[in-house]
Every structure is written in C-alpha cells, then in structure tokens.
Amino acid sequence: MPPRISDPAVWQQAELLMQPAFIRIIDHIRKHLDQSTWKGTYQDVLIWPDETTDETKVIVSQLLQRMEAASLAEQAEIKQALTQMPIPHPGYHLCLQHQGLPQISIDLWELCYQVCFCNYSSSLTHSATGEVQIDTSLIDEDGDVDWQRLNTKAGDLVKQVFANLPVV
C-alpha cells in the first residue's frame, strides 16, 4: 500500500523524488534485463486493501465499469455506493519470466518507495502514526533532486532485486 504522508513538506519532497526514482528504476531494470536470461514485461494492476474479499472486488469492479456509461444521476448513485466500499489503488508490476520457472511479479511502486523513503518496508509501521520519512540525502542543498545519489540508490536496489532471483 502507498505510504501515509500527512505533512505537506514531506508530501512535496515525495512528489519531487517519485517520478525521477521511477524513471531511474525502469532504466536500471532495462540494463539488467539486457544482460540477463530473464524476460520482463510490465503490467498495470489494481492493489486492494488486504481484507478485501473476492466478492467485494467483483462488486467494486462492476460499479466502476458501470460508472463509465452511466448518466449523471446514476453516477451519483454509484459514487455513493462506492463510498462504502474499499477502493483499489493503481499499481505497476514488473513480471519476470524464465523458462521452467514460475513468473515473478515485482511491485515497481514499492521499489520507488524504498528509494525515496528511509528504511521503507511495506510490512512495517514507519512510526507511531504509520508515516514514512523522506530520504533527504536524495535532495541537494538547493532543494533539487541529487541525481547522482538517486541514481546510485535506485541502481543498488535493482541490483539487489536481480541478485535475489532464483539461479537459472
């Protein structure tokens, strides 16, 4: 799930870092795939809250599909119904395949969070409030992205991902 950020200054720093981190991660993945026997594809996914049942997912998906062709009055009804339902957030996964092995799916936004936030782990609470801390070493003294540090951290993370793949 996306990290919780309530401080506007931290939110602004996250916005500064997320897109460059994503781009650097994708570039490092491309470089690793070029030298690897693994094949990679990218897939848009929906990420649901953990407690969401399959039945609820189907209902929400149907409501969202109905919304696209609904009249204004119907849209208002659907929006009201959706306020009582868990809503997924969009995700983007790298799907790695190698002949004879099961497909491995890697959440690219989780990798971005690991680059942009200090000691980020989706399974940990990041403070008493559950909020994360920006890795301020990725921001230079002028308040801009420190491209060298960002590139190094993204590269090291992607290198670690590929090092942890099953040996083929």
Image (tube, rainbow, N blue to C red):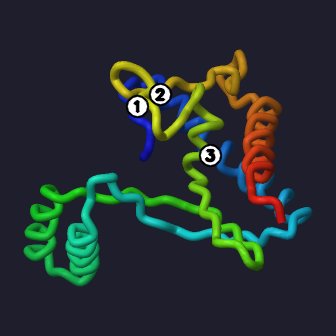
Residue 136 picture location, percent across and down: 63, 21
Report the front residue among 79 and 96.
96
Q: Amino acid at mark 3?
A: Leu
Please report whichever mark, 3 or 1, sits nearer to the chain's N-terminal start. 1
Q: Quick check: marks 2 and 1 in contact, CB under 8 Å?
A: yes
Residue under label 3, please give it.
111
Residue at left offset 15%, top offset 80%: 71
Distance between the alpha carbons at the discs numbered 3 and 1: 17 Å
Q: Amino acid at mark 2?
A: Val
* Crowd class of label 1 (few under 14; some 14 to 19; many from 20; radius 10 Å): some
Give the number of marks.
Answer: 3
Where on the picture, by quarter, is residue 145? top right
Residue at left offset 78%, top offset 29%: 149
Q: Residue furthest top?
A: 141
Residue at left offset 48%, top offset 66%: 45
Asked if 65 appears above or below 157 in the picture, the reply is below
Residue 151 picture location, percent across and down: 79, 38
Q: Which mark is residue 132?
A: 2
* Crowd class of label 3 (few under 14; some 14 to 19; many from 20; radius 10 Å): some
Residue 159 picture location, percent across and down: 80, 46
Report the front residue among 155 and 21.
155
* Side of 132 relative to 29 (left or right): left
Report the front residue among 167 and 82.
167
Kind of element beneath mark 3: helix
Residue at left offset 59%, top offset 27%: 119
Asked if 164 appears above or below 56 in the picture, the reply is above
Q: Amino acid at mark 1?
A: Ile
Residue under label 1, please give it.
5
Kind of element beneath mark 1: loop
